[in-house]
Image (tube, helix red, strand yellow):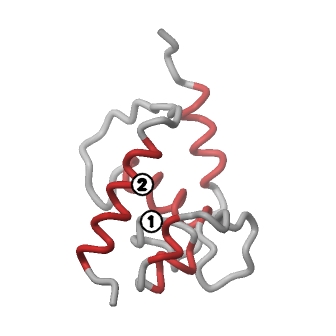
């Protein structure tokens, strides 16, 4: 029966896959915390991308490693991070996120 050791092996495989991905970094100049801009972006991005408790908009592939864990929120959200997967994103999230992207400094 799969347990913590099994999930640890899955997490190691996920880390190997994500190391090969490309990322966009946004500078958010405030202290981390639940009421920070960083917290706002994290909460709303996860809520937006999550399939938990709603119809799948963009289902994970059949090979997605999260399908092999017993954690209901991981399996049904399509995300490995379970924080905020059962929340709704705020209406103005796109506008606030866009303003951060527009203000990026490209080096």
Q: What element carries label 2?
A: helix
Q: In which quarter of the image is residue 57?
A: bottom right
Q: For mark 2, does the 10 Å Cα neighbourhood hold few (<14), some (14 to 19), or many (20 or more) residues?
A: some
Mark 1 element type: loop
Tell which of 23 and 15 is nearer to you: 15
The location of residue 94, given as percent across then percent down, is: 65, 49
Residue that lies at the very extreme toward the bottom in this rendered image: 1
Query: Residue sitting at 58 percent across and 31 percent down?
Result: 101
Instruction: Please indicate whether residue 101 sits to the left or right of residue 40 in the image.
Output: right
The picture places residue 48, in percent across and down from the top left corner, at 61, 63
Query: Image check: 60 left or right of 73?
Result: right
Q: Where is residue 36 in the image (x, y as percent from the top left)?
A: 34, 51
Mark identifier at residue 93: none
Q: Mark 2 points at which residue?
A: 14
**Of pointers 2 and 1, the one earlier in the residue sequence:** 2
* Closer-to-camera residue (22/41): 22
User: Callout 1 environment at 10 Å: few (<14), some (14 to 19), or many (20+)?
Assistant: some
**Residue 89 falls in image quadrant:** bottom right
Considering only vertical position in the picture, is 72 above or below 14? below
Q: Residue at x 54, y 24 (%)?
A: 103
**Residue at left offset 24%, top offset 77%:** 4
- Which mark's residue is nearer the viewer, 2 or 1? 2
Q: Nearer the viewer, residue 2 or 53?
A: 2
Residue at 52%, 23% in the rendered image: 104
Horizontal side, residue 94 vs residue 44: left or right: right
| Inter-mark Cα distance, 2 to 1 | 9 Å
Marks 2 and 1 in Cβ contact (< 8 Å): yes
Quadrant for residue 99, please give it. Answer: top right
The quadrant of the image that shows the N terminus is bottom left
Q: Relative to 83, say whether 43 is above or below.
A: above
Q: Mark 1 points at which residue?
A: 80
């Amino acid at each position: 029966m799969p347990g913590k050791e099994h999930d640890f092996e899955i997490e190691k495989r996920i880390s190997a896959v994500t190391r090969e991905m490309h990322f966009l970094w946004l500078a958010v100049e405030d202290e981390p915390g639940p009421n920070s801009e960083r917290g706002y972006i994290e909460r709303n991005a996860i809520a937006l991308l999550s399939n938990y408790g709603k119809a799948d908009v963009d289902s994970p592939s059949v090979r997605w490693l999260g399908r092999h864990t017993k954690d209901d929120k991981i399996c049904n959200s399509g995300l490995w991070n379970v924080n905020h997967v059962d929340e709704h994103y705020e209406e103005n999230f796109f506008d606030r996120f866009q303003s951060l992207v527009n203000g990026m400094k490209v080096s």
